[in-house]
Image (cartoon, rainbow, N blue to C red):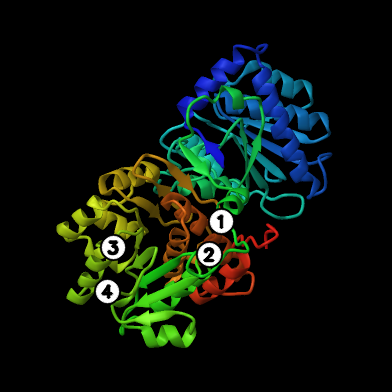
């Protein structure tokens, strides 16, 4: 897991570290790392020597980082120009270093630029870009590199204009609210704006530079981001004693005669998971068995037999029969995943109270509109905070879908999925995801791990499917089998 810390914790850690170092050392470390990454990027477009670099320099430490990095690049033969957005408040030592290395200041952005370094604002920035900065950033699309393309944009620590603690990018009528970077070089640790919300999209590829901050980050991270190694460690292992019931049995109360596809897709997601047997209960049994003959199908939850987890909701409907099936699922003593129609049915206060009072875990998987119905309003600018509040209020693990899916637990832990892709924004992919979560729950994973692991491989499956062309939910279900971290008898990963 990679930790993500809020601005106040980062500032506190930086202050303690700086107290142990000679003045300016931390900025020099950051600038050296930034310059190395910029040089690496320029190597792909003709090299550092002769490259035209534009620095957008604000008043804070990010502006100083940009100036010192510019000095490094100028010393290697780059033509570096600095546009000072707050000339009276620029770090004088950093500006002197740039000039000594051969860099210069300019009053406007040149028309020909190979790389732009965004050092306008950093951790202290709030409320989006100010008008002068927005005007400059708005012109970046008009600039051209030596290859004729738009210049690469590298953000210092985080893209200017995004809210560091939420990733929110404010709306700005007729103006650019935030820098959209190709690469963000961040220092010491990840910040929320780099992993959640619109900020994560504006950040582009994130490159973390070690400046020695780690030992000074003594608070718990605000968010955790899983890595592939975490999934490999969590995913249930097959061994010589494995058999279908010991691997777990997952039940799915999804689909209906009206929406049989939801049943097929959710069962497909479950079959890609680690459980040994899938039971289906609902009105789409014929379609499920035609596609997946290994499934044991019945008409109702009460007839399904023993399972270790239930998935309920996708395509279920909103009538009295659907509500009765949901009640039967909630009455079981096993973990439950609630999706789609099941979430809509929770508008009934009595059903919602059944969820809150359950002893066995519940995972809910709303998109923003479903979230608004459950929480009384949309997630808003602070998606992490809103997800945490809903998890606590409902006593459930919440998986809030989005380009950067968030998982929050009732006890206050938050995870952000790093594998999201826009190709998953198509009908039925959520059904596949719910089935996979249920399979992981039935195999014994805790709800937060089941949710974030499923979101992670679901994102990988979406990317894999996209490499073959346009993506449907069926493509994602099929692609899951190639990306799940199955561990066999020898402990290898395939």
Looking at the rendered image, the disc whose residue lies closer to the viewer, 1 or 4, is: 4
Measured as percent of width and height from the top left, residue 60 is found at 55, 24
Left or right, residue 84 beside residue 358: right
Q: Which residue: 53% across, 42% down?
A: 194
Measured as percent of width and height from the top left, residue 91 is found at 61, 19
Local crowd size for mark 3, using a 10 Å CA cut-off: few (<14), some (14–19), many (≥20)? some
Q: Is residue 111 visible?
A: yes
Q: Name the residue under label 4.
A: 302
Measured as percent of width and height from the top left, residue 276 is found at 51, 69
Tell me whether circle 2 and circle 1 mark residues in contact (CB < 8 Å). yes
Local crowd size for mark 1, using a 10 Å CA cut-off: few (<14), some (14–19), many (≥20)? many
Q: Which mark is residue 235?
A: 1
Left or right, residue 403 beside residue 304: right
Say whether disc 3 or disc 2 marks the residue closer to the N-terminus: 2
Distance in Å between CA atoms under marks 3 and 2: 21 Å
Say whether disc 4 or disc 2 marks the residue closer to the N-terminus: 2
Q: Can residue 124 be seen in this view?
A: no
Q: Name the residue under label 3.
A: 332
Q: Mark 2 points at which residue?
A: 274
């Amino acid at each position: 897991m990679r930790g993500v810390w809020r601005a106040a914790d980062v500032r506190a850690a930086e202050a303690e570290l700086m107290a142990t170092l000679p003045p300016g050392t931390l900025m020099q470390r950051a600038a050296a790392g930034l310059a190395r990454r910029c040089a690496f990027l320029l190597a792909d477009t003709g090299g550092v020597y002769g490259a035209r670099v534009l620095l957008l320099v604000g008043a804070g430490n990010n502006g100083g980082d940009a100036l010192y990095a510019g000095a490094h690049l100028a010393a290697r033969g780059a033509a570096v120009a600095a546009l000072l957005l707050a000339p009276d408040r620029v770090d004088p030592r950093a500006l002197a270093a740039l000039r000594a290395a051969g860099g210069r200041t300019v009053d406007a952005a040149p028309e020909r630029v190979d790389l732009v370094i965004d050092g306008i604002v950093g951790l202290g920035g709030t409320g989006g870009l100010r008008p002068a900065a927005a005007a400059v950033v708005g012109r970046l699309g008009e600039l051209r590199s030596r290859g004729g393309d738009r210049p690469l944009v590298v953000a210092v620590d985080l893209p200017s204009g995004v809210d560091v603690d939420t990733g929110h990018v404010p709306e700005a009528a007729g103006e650019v609210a935030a820098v959209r970077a190709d690469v963000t070089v961040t220092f010491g640790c990840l910040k929320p704006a780099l992993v959640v919300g619109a900020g994560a999209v504006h950040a582009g590829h994130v490159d973390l530079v070690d400046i020695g901050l780690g030992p000074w980050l003594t608070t718990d991270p605000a968010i955790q981001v899983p890595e592939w190694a975490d999934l490999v460690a969590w995913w249930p292992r097959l061994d010589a004693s494995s058999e279908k019931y010991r691997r777990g049995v997952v039940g799915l109360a999804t689909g209906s005669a009206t929406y049989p596809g939801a049943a097929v897709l959710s069962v497909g997601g479950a079959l890609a998971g680690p459980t040994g047997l899938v039971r289906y209960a609902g009105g789409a049994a014929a379609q499920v068995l035609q596609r997946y003959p290994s499934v044991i199908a019945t008409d109702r939850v009460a007839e399904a037999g023993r399972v270790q987890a239930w998935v309920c909701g996708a395509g279920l409907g909103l009538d009295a029969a659907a509500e009765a099936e949901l009640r039967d699922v909630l009455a079981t003593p096993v973990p439950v995943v609630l999706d789609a129609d099941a979430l809509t049915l929770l508008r009934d206060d009595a059903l919602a109270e059944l969820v809150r009072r359950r002893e066995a875990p519940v995972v809910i998987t709303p998109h923003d509109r479903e979230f608004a119905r459950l929480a009384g309003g949309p997630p808003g600018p602070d998606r992490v905070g809103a997800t945490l509040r809903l998890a606590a209020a409902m006593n459930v693990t919440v998986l809030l879908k989005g380009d950067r899916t968030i998982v929050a637990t009732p006890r206050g832990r938050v995870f952000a999925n790093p594998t999201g892709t826009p190709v998953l924004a198509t009908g039925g992919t959520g059904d596949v995801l719910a089935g996979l979560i249920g399979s992981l729950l039935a195999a014994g994973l805790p709800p937060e791990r089941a949710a974030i692991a499923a979101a992670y491989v679901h994102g990988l499956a979406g990317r894999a499917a996209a490499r073959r062309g346009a993506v449907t939910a069926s493509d994602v279900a099929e692609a899951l089998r190639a990306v799940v971290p199955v561990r066999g008898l020898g402990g290898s990963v395939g």
